[in-house]
């Protein structure tokens, strides 16, 4: 056996809606593509700058408030229809 116990650390990310830190697996990844549109990244591996939001309409709503996405992505960012629909 390998000796020292390994500490398992799940990757954690901050929700851009409620600002709480959660396990990455519990969050939805949003990704901004080159055109500035923000998409839902279902695979979690899409290229581009990513941001995370809880899988709750309240958090998505917060994230869609004016300027939130742009701040998270540090630049122009516009939610796609799919992202908007998460906030309903
Ligand atoms: Zn949240």
Image (cartoon, rainbow, N blue to C red):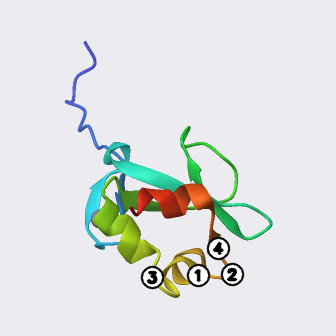
Identify which residue, 52 or 38, lies in the foreground: 38
Residue 74 in the image: state x and y as whole percent.
Answer: 61, 81
Residue named by callout 2? 76
**In this orientation, does residue 21 appear?**
yes
Q: Are marks 2 and 4 in contact (CB under 8 Å)?
A: yes
Disc 2 to disc 3, C-alpha distance? 14 Å
Disc 2 to disc 4, C-alpha distance? 7 Å
Image vertical order of residue 17 relative to residue 81, above or below: below
Residue named by callout 1? 70
Residue named by callout 3? 65
Residue placed at 80% from the left, 67% from the top? 35
Residue 8 in the image: state x and y as whole percent.
Answer: 26, 37
Answer left or right for 52 relative to 38.
left
Disc 2 to disc 1, C-alpha distance? 5 Å
Answer left or right for 74 relative to 13.
right
Describe the element under mark 1 as helix, strand or loop: helix
């Amino acid at each position: 056996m390998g000796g020292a116990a390994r500490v398992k650390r799940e990757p954690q990310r901050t929700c851009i809606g409620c600002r709480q830190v959660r396990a990455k697996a519990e969050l939805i990844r949003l990704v901004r593509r080159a055109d500035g549109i923000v998409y839902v990244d279902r695979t979690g591996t899409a290229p581009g700058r990513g941001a995370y939001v809880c899988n709750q309409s309240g958090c998505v709503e917060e994230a869609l408030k004016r300027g939130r996405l742009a701040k998270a992505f540090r630049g122009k960012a516009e939610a796609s229809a799919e992202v908007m629909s998460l906030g309903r």
